[in-house]
């Protein structure tokens, strides 16, 4: 599929999804939101893509909303704005719900809606010179659409400060509060991302999918008998699955599991293509 505002590159078991509007600092508009939603579906259906990296072309990851898009939203009535916000929210939820592991590769700056993109990914790696900000209140707005994801990523206490002040904070602070998992120098950012991808590709794809669903299902739920029974059913299903049986057999037989051999084959194919 051809896209206007994003770019997808696949190889070696990984899909790289690039925000590709560097002339406007990869700012969102309605076209990019729609294309991201479609791209997530395309990547989900691609069995060769075991993991996803979300990144930005140019000098920064993403500056948030496009000014022209914001102007059009300002001219809409309540229902028009609600519909537009739902479209953005659906896109973020589509990213969060991807069955494949997702990694945000962040550099330069990430403001407003970009914070939602990062938080909707499973793992975030940032260059040490990146700046972050939840800017909405300085525009008379509220970060409502991104709040479920950003609050979960940075925690309520940090959100009380950064949602209300809208101040910029450095990558070291983003790392301290848990919004970013790992920092790297600019020249080492890709190496840091690749190191995480190598670990992700060692996991069984089906097990990773159900584990993502497990996290979403368990988080913030009280530990009740219903939860205990739910968790028991999930592990029983995993043990009885073909992946579960293969993983245990491989461990007992002291050999790589089938999915790891397949991942190595993908890497070998990619290496041959580059020659």
Image (tube, rainbow, N blue to C red):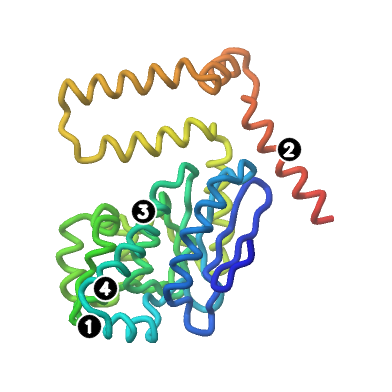
Mark 2: which secondary structure? helix
Answer with mark 4 or mark 2, whichever residue precedes in sequence. Answer: 4
Label 1, residues with CA under 10 Å away: few <14, some 14-19, many ≥20: few
Q: Which residue is disc 2 drawn over?
A: 265
Q: Is residue 127 above or below residue 273?
A: below
Mark 3: which secondary structure? helix
Q: Which residue is disc 4 drawn over?
A: 81
Q: Which residue is disc 1 drawn over?
A: 139
Q: Nearer the viewer, mark 3 or mark 1?
A: 3
Answer with mark 1 or mark 2, whichever residue precedes in sequence. Answer: 1
Q: Nearer the viewer, residue 206 or 161?
A: 206
Q: CA distance from mark 4 to mark 1?
A: 16 Å
Marks 2 and 3 in Cβ contact (< 8 Å): no
Q: Is residue 14 above or below residue 36?
A: above
Find residue 93 and name its label.
3
- What residue do we see at 20% from left, 77% from top? 141
Marks 4 and 2 in Cβ contact (< 8 Å): no
Answer with mark 3 or mark 4, whichever residue precedes in sequence. Answer: 4
Q: Nearer the viewer, residue 168 or 135?
A: 135
Q: Nearer the viewer, mark 4 or mark 1?
A: 4
The C terminus - image quarter? bottom right
> Is residue 105 shown left or right of residue 133?
right
Marks 3 and 4 in Cβ contact (< 8 Å): no
Mark 4: which secondary structure? helix
- What residue do we see at 56% from left, 52% from top? 42
> Is residue 59 shown left or right of residue 227?
right
Q: Nearer the viewer, mark 4 or mark 2?
A: 4
Q: Nearer the viewer, residue 73 or 28?
A: 73
Label 2, residues with CA under 10 Å away: few <14, some 14-19, many ≥20: some
């Amino acid at each position: 599929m051809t896209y206007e505002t994003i770019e997808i590159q696949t190889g070696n078991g990984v899909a790289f999804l690039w925000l590709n509007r560097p002339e406007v600092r990869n700012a969102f508009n309605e076209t990019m939101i729609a294309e991201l939603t479609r791209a997530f579906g395309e990547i989900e259906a691609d069995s060769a893509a075991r993991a996803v990296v979300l990144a930005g072309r140019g000098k920064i990851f993403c500056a948030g909303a496009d000014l022209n898009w914001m102007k059009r939203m300002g001219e809409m009535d309540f229902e028009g704005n609600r519909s537009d916000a739902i479209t953005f929210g659906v896109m973020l939820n589509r990213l969060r719900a991807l069955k494949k592991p997702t990694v945000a590769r962040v550099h330069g700056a990430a403001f407003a809606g970009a914070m939602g993109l990062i938080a909707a990914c499973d793992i975030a790696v940032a260059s040490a010179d990146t700046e972050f900000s939840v800017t909405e209140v300085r525009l008379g707005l509220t970060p409502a659409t991104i709040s479920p994801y950003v609050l979960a990523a940075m925690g309520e206490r940090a959100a009380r400060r950064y949602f209300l002040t809208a101040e910029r904070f450095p990558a070291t602070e983003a790392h301290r509060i848990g919004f970013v998992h790992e920092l790297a120098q600019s020249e080492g950012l890709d190496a840091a991302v690749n190191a995480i991808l190598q670990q992700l590709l060692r996991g069984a794809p089906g097990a990773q999918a159900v584990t993502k669903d497990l996290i979403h299902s368990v988080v913030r739920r009280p530990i009740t008998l219903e939860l205990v029974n739910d968790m028991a059913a999930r592990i029983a299903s995993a043990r009885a699955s073909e992946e579960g049986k293969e993983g245990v057999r491989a461990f007992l037989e002291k050999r790589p599991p089938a999915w790891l051999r397949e991942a190595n084959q993908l890497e070998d194919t990619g290496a041959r293509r580059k020659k």
